[in-house]
Amino acid sequence: MSEANESWFPLFEFKTFLYRSFLVAPSETFPAGPVILTDWMKAEFICEQATREGDLYQVNARLVLRPGSEVLVDVRSRNGIGDRPATFEATGHGMTGDTAGAVYRFSGLVHPALPTAFDSAVIDCIRGAVTSVQGPASTPLVELGGCPVGTAGAFVIVPSG
């Protein structure tokens, strides 16, 4: 990995990832037993040009739920340092089709697979939490998955293929 205090940049550029989110609910035996995960949303996470300025990075991406149904995602976060993951802070805005008007917030960590040249790293996975802030214009109090606005869950983003 990078030197202990060396900053590394996540390699998002022009890559397609798989996005999956889950609703987390307690089981009958919670807290001693397991939690129940229910699929919330599945999509392709398609990244555009990423930029780096000092210890910060920015990338624009699209969550493509199905053709014509997309959420534009603006990621602005901090690079990883040494063995520590990079942060992932983003806001998604539904812009097309049935997503128009929907808003989501994402917060998580970018875990590197392997360090590469020039202080950058291939992405192994991104894990974190997603919260629905606003539903689409057609149903502003109900988000795209049918849950009430304010619903939060877990997400994971992994390379496709």
Image (spheres, rainbow, N blue to C red):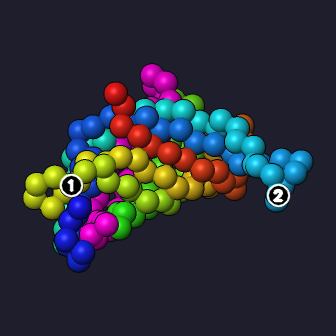
- Say what amino acid the circle numbered 2 marks: Ala
The spot of residue 139 in percent (x, y) is 69, 40
Residue 153: x percent and y percent?
Answer: 64, 51
Residue denoted by label 1: 115
Q: How crowded is mark 2: few (under 14 residues within 10 Å), some or many (20 or more)?
A: few
> In this rendering, is residue 61 above or below 131?
above
41 is higher (above) or lower (below) than 29: above
Q: How far apart are marks 2 and 1 (CA)?
A: 38 Å
Q: Give the range drawn in magenta.
A: 56-83
**Magenta stretch: includes residue 52:** no
Can the viewer see residue 128 in this picture? yes
Side of 83 relative to 20 (left or right): left
- Image quadrant for the N terminus? bottom left
* Residue at 70% over, 42% down: 37
The amino acid type of the residue labelled 1 equals Pro
Query: Which one is nearer the viewer's eye here, 113 or 93?
Result: 113
Q: Does the magenta stretch include residue 73?
A: yes
Q: Nearer the viewer, residue 80 or 41?
A: 80
Is residue 29 or residue 151 the one in the foreground?
A: 29
Q: Residues within 10 Å of mark 1 (few under 14, many from 20)?
A: some
Name the N-terminal-most of marks 2 and 1. Answer: 2
Q: Could you tell me if the residues under marks 2 and 1 are in contact, i.e. CB atoms within 8 Å?
A: no
Dominant secondary-structure state across the stretch colored magenta: strand
- Circle number at residue 32: 2
Q: Position of residue 2 (x, y in %)?
A: 21, 65
Dot label at residue 63: none
* Residue lying at the far right of the rendered structure: 28
Could you tell me how many numbered marks the image carries?
2
> In the figure, is residue 134 to the left or right of 120?
right
- Secondary structure, mark 1, is strand
